[in-house]
Image (spheres, rainbow, N blue to C red):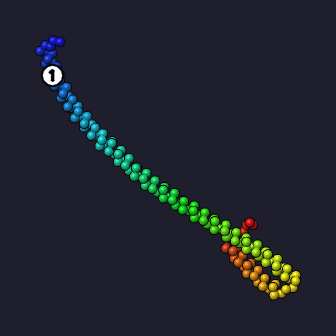
Amino acid sequence: METTPDSNASLGEASIGDSDDRVGSSETLRMQLLAIRDEWLAPLVAQIAEQAATIGRLEERLEQERRRSDELEAWKTSKIIEKDELIARLHRRIADLAEELDAVESAARHDDVDTLRARVSALEDATAVHSRARRSGMRFRKP
């Protein structure tokens, strides 16, 4: 390929001009990227960091609420068990009192006054306990 002085001059000028344009373009591009970073990216990163912190706090609060819920569920279960045990004891006591009443009625038929008085006294005591339990809101179910 043959070059002429004019074509060499054109090539030389073009490459020098391109180099200046590239340096200018590169500086302009750098400034634009810095502006994007400062105006768009930095606030976005800050917002993401803030949201991540909020999510972390919410996840911790959720975990605390789950633990509290588990504790309440365990407490509720223990109270249900206690209630059921109390009801079972009361049913056994009622059955014992029914037997005692049968014995009192039998003693009354046989005119055994001392036995009758002792059994009536025991029956009155048990009835008082049963009445107090009912007044306190206790409900009784048949076993």
Whether 56 is drawn above or below 18: the answer is below
In what quadrant of the picture does the N terminus appear? top left
Give the residue drawn at x 85%, y 79%.
Answer: 106
The residue wearing badge 1 is 13
The amino acid on which the numbered mark 1 sits, given as a three-letter code, is: Glu
Q: In which quadrant of the rendered view does residue 98 lie?
A: bottom right
Whole-percent x and y of residue 113? 83, 87
Look at the picture and state if 24 lies above or below 38. Answer: above
Rendering coords of residue 140 (x, y %): 72, 69
Asked which secondary structure carries label 1, the reply is helix
Query: For the point 13% across and 18% down, which residue is it?
Result: 9
Q: Within the image, what quadrant is residue 44 found in? A: top left
Q: Quadrant of the C terminus?
A: bottom right
Q: Residue at x 67, y 73 (%)?
A: 136
Classify residue 56 as left or right of residue 72: left
In the picture as drawn, the residue positioned furthest to the top comes out as 2
- Residue 28: give x, y in percent of width and height: 23, 34
Count how many numbered circles sit on residues in the image.
1
Q: Residues within 10 Å of mark 1 (few under 14, many from 20)?
A: few
Out of 111 and 15, give the one closest to the viewer: 111
